[in-house]
Image (cartoon, rainbow, N blue to C red):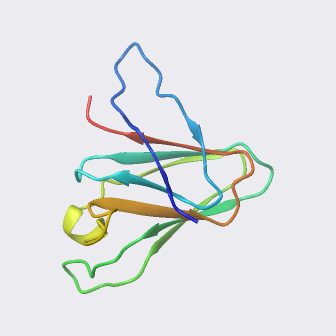
């Protein structure tokens, strides 16, 4: 199954960012290196949100980053360096992908610069 694209939202002081229900097959966004991802878990169970890193970082670390979002809490993650997090080839080049342990009552928004 394909990842579902997130629209990058550029919030202002007067507009609240609209959240999207997380997709069971995962989400992705076109990464400029400036976005932050806000996750809201409105469920009674904690969720693990995994950001997939296809390239080693500048310190040589490889592998994905898993963020635990406890029940009824929020997590703000990012920004994501393009050279470490962006897919390098294919139709989704330039995007970062996210997977979830479960998506019940889990919402997300990709926040760009104001």
- Rendered image quadrant of residue 54: bottom left
Instruction: Check the image and report above or below for 25 versus 84.
Output: above
Q: Residue 6 or 55: which is nearer the viewer?
A: 6
Question: What residue lies at 26% left-to-right and 60% top-to-bottom?
Answer: 94
Residue found at the far front of this picture: 91
* Lateral position of residue 106 relative to residue 36, left or right: right
- Rendered image quadrant of residue 10: top left
Q: Residue 111 or 29: which is nearer the viewer?
A: 29
Question: What residue lies at 25% left-to-right and 72% top-to-bottom?
Answer: 88
In the picture, the quarter occupied by the C terminus is top left
Image coordinates for residue 78, horizontal then vertical, percent: 35, 54
Instruction: Check the image and report above or below for 80 versus 5.
Output: below
Question: What residue lies at 28% left-to-right and 64% top-to-bottom?
Answer: 93
Residue found at the far top of this picture: 14
Question: What residue lies at 24% left-to-right and 86% top-to-bottom?
Answer: 60
Instruction: Check the image and report above or below for 38 versus 68.
Output: above
Image coordinates for residue 75, horizontal then vertical, percent: 52, 49
Q: Residue 76 or 80: which is nearer the viewer?
A: 80
* Lateral position of residue 43 relative to residue 113, left or right: right
Q: How many marks?
A: 0
In the picture, the quarter occupied by the N terminus is bottom right
Image coordinates for residue 33, horizontal then vertical, percent: 23, 53
Q: Residue 9 or 46: which is nearer the viewer?
A: 9
Image coordinates for residue 32, horizontal then vertical, percent: 22, 50
Residue found at the far right of this picture: 44
């Amino acid at each position: 199954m394909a990842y579902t694209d997130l629209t990058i939202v550029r919030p202002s002081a007067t507009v609240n960012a609209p959240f999207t229900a997380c997709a069971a097959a995962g989400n992705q966004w076109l990464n400029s290196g400036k976005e932050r991802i806000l996750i809201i878990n409105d469920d009674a169970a904690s969720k693990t949100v995994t950001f997939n890193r296809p390239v080693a970082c500048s310190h040589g670390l490889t592998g994905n980053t898993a963020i635990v979002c406890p029940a009824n809490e929020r997590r703000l993650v990012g920004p994501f360096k393009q050279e470490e997090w962006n897919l390098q080839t294919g139709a989704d080049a330039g995007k970062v992908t996210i997977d979830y342990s479960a998506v019940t009552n889990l919402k997300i928004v990709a926040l760009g610069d104001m």
